[in-house]
Image: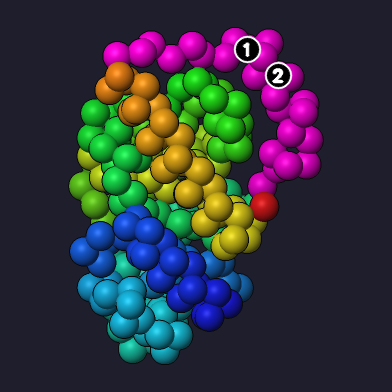
Amino acid sequence: MQAELIAAAQALDALGFMPSKSGNLSCRTERGCLITPAGLPYAETGPEDLVEVAPDGSVLGGHRRPSSEWRLHMAIYAARPEAGAVVHTHSPFATALSCARQPIPPFHYMIALAGGADIRCSAYATFGTAALAEATIAALEGRRAALLANHGAVAIGKSLAGAQTLAMEVENLARQYLALRAAGLPPVLLTEAELREVFAQFGDYGRLT
């Protein structure tokens, strides 16, 4: 689990999804979650720097401070028992859209990968707070990904690989959607009937991974 977390964090960092030591990843454990540390560049992070955190925030293992967003991660694990991993990024296009506090509408069928007809943007709350955790849970209701207002994006998965893949797709969708808007082209949104066909076609592919 430790090696997988480090590899995922460093891969997302290399893509520009974690600028200035931002963003954080975690995996559920029996006692809480294993999360990336606060304030350490991902290129310099090793397995020994990961922190195991209890639901109340107490450190169960590790010598560093956990990410300031541990509340967000623990709230997701409490609310979504199917989630085994959480990926929170500051990827550029998703973050830009979150700063407009706009959702990603169903302009492309891959929106269904996030579990619903859109990718919501949460209400705004200060980073690292219980209020942000609550706002995130609300935005994730019936979804596997959300934008965080004036902040970034979050994706959940049964596995870390699944959460990482979804975080990358959220960024891809945000980039495409903003490109359409920048070009002055109004996106043609999928209808409810078309979305139902998409979900039926997805089958197991659309389930949490």
Q: Is residue 105 left or right of residue 179?
A: right
User: Could you tell me which residue is drawn at 39 percent across and 35 percent down?
Assistant: 174
Which stretch appears magenta?
Answer: 184-208
The circle on residue 141 is none
Of residues 26 and 43, the one drawn nearer to the viewer in this rendering: 43
Res 172 → quadrant: top left
**Residue furthest toward the front?**
183
User: Could you tell me which residue is drawn at 57 percent across and 14 percent down?
Assistant: 190
Res 47 → quadrant: bottom left
Q: Is residue 44 left or right of residue 159?
A: left
Query: Which kind of residue does numbered mark 2 sit on?
Result: Arg
In the picture of the structure, the residue carrying the numbered disc 2 is 196
Work out whether 136 lies above or below 190: below
Q: Is residue 31 left or right of residue 128?
A: right
User: Could you tell me which residue is drawn at 74 percent across and 33 percent down?
Assistant: 202
The circle on residue 192 is 1
Judged from the image, the secondary structure of the residue bearing numbered disc 2 is helix
Work out whether 72 lies above or below 1: above
User: Could you tell me which residue is drawn at 46 percent across and 76 percent down?
Assistant: 6
On the image, the x and y values in percent for residue 46 come to 40, 85
